[in-house]
Image (cartoon, grey):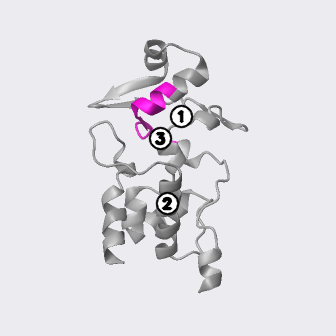
Amino acid sequence: MVEQLSRQAFSCRMCGCCCLGQGGIVLTSRDQERLRTCLGLPLAEFLARYTEQQGEKVCLITNQANVCVFFETGQGCSVHASKPDICRAWPFFRGNLLDVMSWKMAQDVCPGINPDVEHRDFVSQGFMYLQAQDLVRSPDPQTPTALVVQDLIEERGAEG
């Protein structure tokens, strides 16, 4: 049991699997500011060049291959040090923390998720990581739903 808890639940392999797909990279105001500063652009220009509005949320666009506009084959994320909070949080998303089946499905696409770690340990490590990185969010129209885990952490604390 002690050995199991000491295993790392996730170690990024920089494969880009999580960078694939349109509409999933929701940007908070904090993300927008961090990225526009990284790129040396005024906010309006950053938003016009790299984002699209989806309801109340601002999302990064994808390239012709349906991959995040900042992912470069063979190199990885070109804005890695300034990447959005949603990217920083992967794979510790609400669905993967709540649901064993979602967590197992994430393992099928992400080689960085350790399949030898039990889900409860993945959840524990996920909560610790999200808190340490200031990625825990409460519901807000602009916030990526995957980061809304404050209630889960509070619920877990109440359970002892």
86 sits to left or right of 7: left
Furthest toward the bottom, the residue is 1
Mark 3 crowdedness (10 Å alpha carbons): few <14, some 14-19, many ≥20: some
Q: Residue at x 54, y 57 (%)?
A: 109
Q: Residue at x 47, y 44 (%)?
A: 86
The percent coordinates of residue 45 (x first, y second) are 47, 13
The three-letter code of the residue at mark 2 reads: Ala
**Reading the chain from its start, which is encountered first: label 2 or label 3?**
3
Local secondary structure at mark 2: helix
Please name the residue that numbered disc 2 is placed on: 106
Residue annotated with mark 1: 68
Q: Secondary structure at mark 1?
A: loop
Asked whether residue 108 appears in the rendered view, the answer is yes
Tell me where residue 155 sits by quadrant: bottom left
Query: In the image, which residues are magenta?
Result: 20-33
Q: Calculate the distance from the C-alpha at mark 2 to the C-alpha at mark 3.
A: 14 Å
